[in-house]
């Protein structure tokens, strides 16, 4: 059984009379334990694909399934349940609630997944080197700290699949090394990762590199 599968995904957006074809018949599948780097120029459709895979955006054509369960064209309650059970999502921005501390963001993420475990949450923060920042608000964190806290929140509910949009976009070298090390460990334990990125280090660490260009996907090596 695949961890995640997308078949013939199409997504169109409209700006005035202009139609933007963000996804053009994308086929994509993920095996358990894979780390896939999704590369390509800005505007190529990487973020749109992640949003469709997560069920936060609905494709205009095609379908997505997670752990062999259909995601596309299901009621929002069904999609939310699938996300809570299987997915951890890190977007480029707004991953953390600005009015909640790091610890409170972790608790909120765990609550959605119905896995309240403060000790586990603290352990994740310590692993990422930000245990002492658990009482800080997101606005009080550096770029690297915020990225690590965002990834920690994505992991808080114990997901089996991580969908990450530029997970090392604003981090320093030390933070990047910590994130890459954790992702390798996560996959070794059977987890699955898709990371949309411009970072060559992530591409080198990935088991497969897929390239997006003009809404089309090459599944690569």
Image: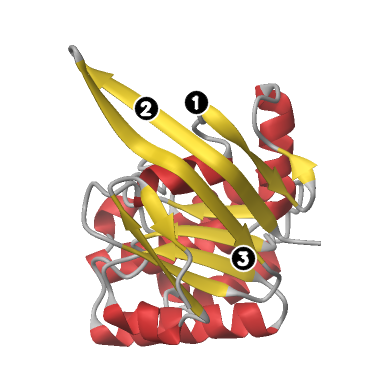
Residue displayed at 67% across by 55% down: 4
Q: Which residue is mark 1?
A: 60
Q: How many marks?
A: 3
Q: Are marks 2 and 3 in contact (CB under 8 Å)?
A: no
Q: Is residue 53 left or right of residue 150?
A: right
Residue 142 seen from this side:
no
Q: Can you give x and y, in whole percent of width and height, for residue 202 in the image?
A: 38, 78
How far apart, in angstroms, are the residues tagged by discs 2 and 1?
A: 7 Å
> Label 1: how many residues lie within 10 Å, few (<14), some (14-19) or many (20+)?
some
> Label 2: how many residues lie within 10 Å, few (<14), some (14-19) or many (20+)?
some
Q: Is residue 113 left or right of residue 57?
A: right
Residue displayed at 63% across by 69% down: 192
| Helix, strand or loop for disc 1 | loop
> Label 3: how many residues lie within 10 Å, few (<14), some (14-19) or many (20+)?
many
Q: Are marks 2 and 1 in contact (CB under 8 Å)?
A: yes
Relative depth, front residue between 122 and 10: 10
Name, please, the residue furthest toward the top: 17
Residue displayed at 49% across by 47% down: 26
Residue displayed at 72% across by 76% down: 190
Q: Can you give x and y, in whole percent of width and height, for residue 65 in the image?
A: 70, 44
How far apart, in angstroms, are the residues tagged by discs 2 and 3?
A: 38 Å
**Which tag, 1 or 3, sits closer to the chain's start?**
1
Relative depth, front residue between 24 and 208: 24
Q: Which residue is mark 2?
A: 12
Q: Looking at the rendered structure, which numbered label has been put on residue 121?
A: 3
| Helix, strand or loop for disc 3 | helix
| Helix, strand or loop for disc 2 | strand
Q: Is residue 41 left or right of residue 66?
A: left
Circle 1 or circle 3, nearest the eye = 1
Q: Can you give x and y, in whole percent of width and height, for residue 120 in the image?
A: 68, 69
């Amino acid at each position: 059984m695949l961890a995640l599968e997308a078949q013939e995904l199409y997504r169109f957006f409209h700006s005035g009379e202009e139609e933007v074809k963000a996804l053009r018949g994308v086929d994509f599948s993920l095996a358990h334990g894979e780390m896939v780097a999704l590369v390509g120029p800005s505007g190529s459709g990487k973020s749109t694909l992640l949003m469709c895979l997560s069920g936060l955006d609905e494709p205009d054509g095609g379908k997505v399934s997670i752990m062999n369960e259909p995601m596309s064209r299901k009621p929002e309650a069904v999609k939310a349940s699938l996300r809570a059970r299987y997915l951890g999502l890190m977007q480029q921005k707004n991953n953390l609630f600005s009015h909640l501390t790091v610890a409170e963001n972790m608790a909120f993420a765990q609550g959605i997944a119905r896995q309240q475990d403060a000790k586990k949450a603290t352990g994740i923060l310590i692993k990422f080197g930000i245990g002492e920042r658990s009482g800080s608000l997101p606005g009080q964190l550096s770029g690297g700290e915020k990225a690590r806290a965002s990834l920690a929140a994505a992991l808080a509910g114990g997901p089996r699949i991580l969908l990450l949009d530029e997970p090392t976009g604003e981090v320093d070298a030390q933070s990047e090394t910590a994130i890459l090390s954790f992702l390798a460990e996560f996959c070794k334990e059977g987890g699955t990762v898709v990371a949309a990125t411009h970072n060559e280090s992530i591409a080198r660490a990935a088991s497969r590199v897929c390239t997006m260009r003009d809404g089309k996907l090459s599944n690569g090596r």
